[in-house]
Image: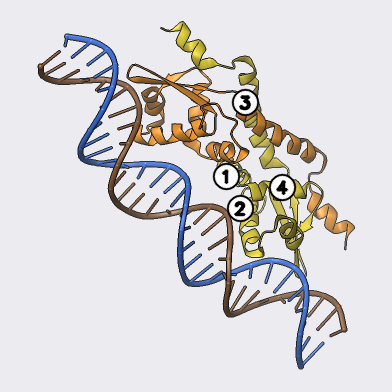
Chain colours: A orange, B yellow, C brown, D blue
Amino acid sequence: MSPSAPASLDVVFAALSDPTRRAVVERLRLGPATMTELATPLSATLPALTKHLAVLERAGLVTTAKRGRQRFCALTAAPLRDAAAWLAEYAAYWDERLDALTGYLKENP
Amino acid sequence: MSPSAPASLDVVFAALSDPTRRAVVERLRLGPATMTELATPLSATLPALTKHLAVLERAGLVTTAKRGRQRFCALTAAPLRDAAAWLAEYAAYWDERLDALTGYLKENP
DNA sequence: TTGATAGTTCACCACTTGGTGAAGTATTGT
DNA sequence: ACAATACTTCACCAAGTGGTGAACTATCAA
């Protein structure tokens, strides 16, 4: 698996479905951080965080680089743009029809 | 669980992480559909689709109503807007910094 | 060199997922 | 009444998830 390979929506959405991982992403908006810098405020253990980072990296959302004994983590651009684009289509759609079902059922008795 | 309760990002993203369920959502953009109308083009079995619909309903993405022996399914608005909003923040952020990590590591040798 | 620090890897656990086929329920058409 | 239709529910399975503690590796600092 190449580090910044285009990840599918499957793994991107799956990665974002975990609150700890979303917290990691939110933390990384402030700038790159090491594993312990990420783990401490989340009161997550390092083994657990290692797994979460693997998921985020597989999804292409996060890049990491080892510097000495520290591992720096930072956000990546592309995959989330795809996910956002996918959602944006539906957000636009829903702005128009808020209650498609009851409307449909009224029109088709 | 109330039918259109505001669902957390957890369940929304988890619901969208499955390709079959995203296909269901895409199909429902064309308008409401029954279970078999959803199942057939996806070549999914009805038991499997029943489970997927349960996930989509728990996430608040889809509403269903039973009419006789048919079950009509349609999209719902709110939860995906939250997910889209969450992602939009990051999309905007990533437009600015495409390679935060290498930038950071260069500035902090 | 010795010891602390930073992180990884391992085996293991309970739990959830997505799928199946078979059986069951309820509505509808003849 | 009977049979087909439209689903649902059930028990089950294989695979994956998130978490743990303990052991291991690698770097850095004294």
Q: Is residue A46 above or below residue B92?
A: below
User: Can residue A101 be seen in the rendering of this structure?
Assistant: yes
Place of residue D19 in the rendered image (x, y in percent of width and height, measured from the top left): 37, 41
Amino acid on which disc 2 is placed: Val
Q: Nearer the viewer, residue A16 or B81?
A: A16
Mark 1 → mark 3, Cα distance in angstroms = 20 Å
- The disc placed on residue A78 is 3
User: How packed is label 2: few (under 14 Cα within 10 Å), some, or many (20 or more)?
Assistant: some
Name the residue beneath numbered marker 1. B14
Name the residue beneath numbered marker 2. B55
User: How packed is label 3: few (under 14 Cα within 10 Å), some, or many (20 or more)?
Assistant: some
Same chain for labels 4 and 2? Say yes or no: yes
Mark 3 → mark 4, Cα distance in angstroms = 23 Å
Name the residue beneath numbered marker 4. B25
Amino acid on which disc 3 is placed: Ala
Q: Earlier in the sequence, mark 2 or mark 1?
A: 1
Q: Nearer the viewer, residue A88 or C20?
A: C20
- Disc 3 on helix, strand or loop? helix
